[in-house]
C-alpha cells in the first residue's frame, strides 16, 4: 500500500511539473503566407514573454510584413505600420515603450532563435528592445577558423556547447550579449529558410510580400 501511495505521489508530481513547464514556456504558432512557424517563449525573459503574449492577444501582429530579410542572417517582422492600409504611417518609438533588456547568457543566437529588435547603442545604450519588432535567426554555420577569427576580432569567448551549436547548426554569434533572445523555433525552420531565401531589394525588403496572417497560442 505504501509503495502504491508513493508511486501515485511521484506520478502526480511529474504531472504537476509537466504542466508547470508548459505554462512557463508556452508555444505559439505564427501563421504566415508561406507556412507556419511554431515558437517557444523562454521563462527567464518574463518581460518579453508577457509583451509578446499581450501583442498576440491584441492582434497587433495580424497582417504585418516580414519587412527585413537577409539570407544567412535573419528575418525581421512586427512593424504595425506595414499592415495593409497603414503603409507610410510614421510611429515614433518612445523610450518609455521599450522593453528593458533581458540578456540571459544561456539564450544565444543559434539558428531559429527568436529575439527582439532594437535601436542602436547611440540612442539606446541600455539595449532596450523594440515594443513590437522581433526577428528569427537564419544564420550560417561557423567553421573552426571562422569562429576563431570572431573571437579574435571581438575579444570575447563562447561556452563550448554554444560554439558547438554554431558549428553544427549555425546562427549569428556576433549578436550575442547585444540583443534579447526570448524564445526559439520548435517547428517550421523550413519556413524560416523559405522566407530568408526570398529575393530582396537594396533595402532588404522581400520582392514577394510575406505577411503574418495571425499568431495563436497552442
Image (spheres, grey):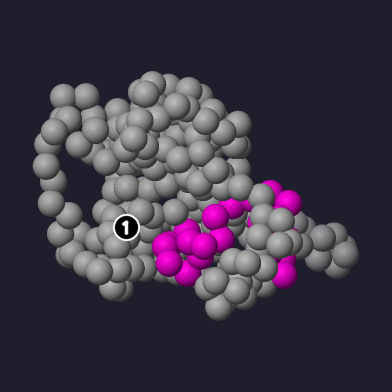
Question: Which quadrant does the N terminus fall into?
Answer: bottom right
Confirm whether residue 14 shows in the render.
no
- Counting from the top left corner in percent of width and height, residue 58 is at 26, 40
- Counting from the top left corner in percent of width and height, residue 207 is at 37, 24
In the image: residue 92, left or right of residue 201? left
Q: What element carries label 1?
A: loop
Q: For mark 1, does the 10 Å Cα neighbourhood hold few (<14), some (14 to 19), or many (20 or more) residues?
A: many
- Counting from the top left corner in percent of width and height, residue 163 is at 68, 64
Q: Which residue is drawn at 16% across and 24% down?
A: 85
Find disc 1 in the rendering and name its residue: 118
Tell me the magenta residue range.
160-181
Q: Which residue is drawn at 42% across and 22% down?
A: 33
Closer to us: 44 or 160: 160
Closer to us: 31 or 175: 175
Closer to us: 166 or 203: 203
Confirm whether residue 200 shows in the render.
yes
Q: Number of labelled discs?
A: 1
Compared to residue 18, the image places residue 85 above or below, namely above
- Counting from the top left corner in percent of width and height, residue 77 is at 36, 40
Q: Is residue 165 magenta?
A: yes
Compared to residue 81, the image places residue 20 above or below, namely below
Task: Give residue 162's quadrant in the image.
Answer: bottom right
Residue farthest to the bottom, as pictured: 155
Compared to residue 63, the image places residue 19 above or below, namely below
Task: Give residue 209's quadrant in the image.
Answer: top left
Q: Which residue is drawn at 57% across and 76% down?
A: 156
Q: Residue at x 59, y 36 (%)?
A: 189
Q: Is residue 122 magenta?
A: no
Amino acid at each position: 500500500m505504501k509503495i502504491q501511495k508513493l508511486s501515485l505521489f511521484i506520478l502526480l508530481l511529474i504531472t504537476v511539473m509537466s504542466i508547470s513547464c508548459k505554462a512557463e514556456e508556452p508555444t505559439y504558432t505564427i501563421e504566415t503566407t508561406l507556412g507556419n512557424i511554431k515558437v517557444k517563449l523562454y521563462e527567464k525573459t518574463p518581460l518579453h514573454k508577457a509583451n509578446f503574449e499581450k501583442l498576440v492577444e491584441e492582434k497587433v501582429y495580424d497582417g504585418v510584413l516580414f519587412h527585413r530579410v537577409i539570407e544567412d542572417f535573419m528575418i525581421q517582422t512586427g512593424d504595425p505600420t506595414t499592415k495593409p492600409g497603414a503603409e507610410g504611417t510614421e510611429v515614433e518609438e518612445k523610450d518609455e515603450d521599450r522593453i528593458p533588456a533581458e540578456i540571459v547568457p544561456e539564450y544565444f543566437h543559434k539558428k531559429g532563435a527568436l529575439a527582439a529588435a532594437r535601436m542602436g547603442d547611440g540612442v539606446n545604450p541600455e539595449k532596450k528592445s523594440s515594443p513590437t519588432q522581433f526577428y528569427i535567426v537564419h544564420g550560417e554555420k561557423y567553421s573552426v577558423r571562422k569562429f576563431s577569427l570572431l573571437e579574435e576580432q571581438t575579444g570575447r569567448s563562447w561556452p563550448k556547447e554554444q560554439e558547438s551549436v554554431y558549428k553544427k547548426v549555425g546562427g549569428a554569434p556576433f549578436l550575442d550579449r547585444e540583443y534579447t533572445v526570448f524564445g526559439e523555433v520548435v517547428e517550421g525552420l523550413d519556413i524560416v529558410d523559405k522566407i530568408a531565401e526570398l529575393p530582396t531589394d537594396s533595402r532588404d525588403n522581400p520582392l514577394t510580400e510575406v505577411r503574418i496572417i495571425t499568431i495563436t497560442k497552442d
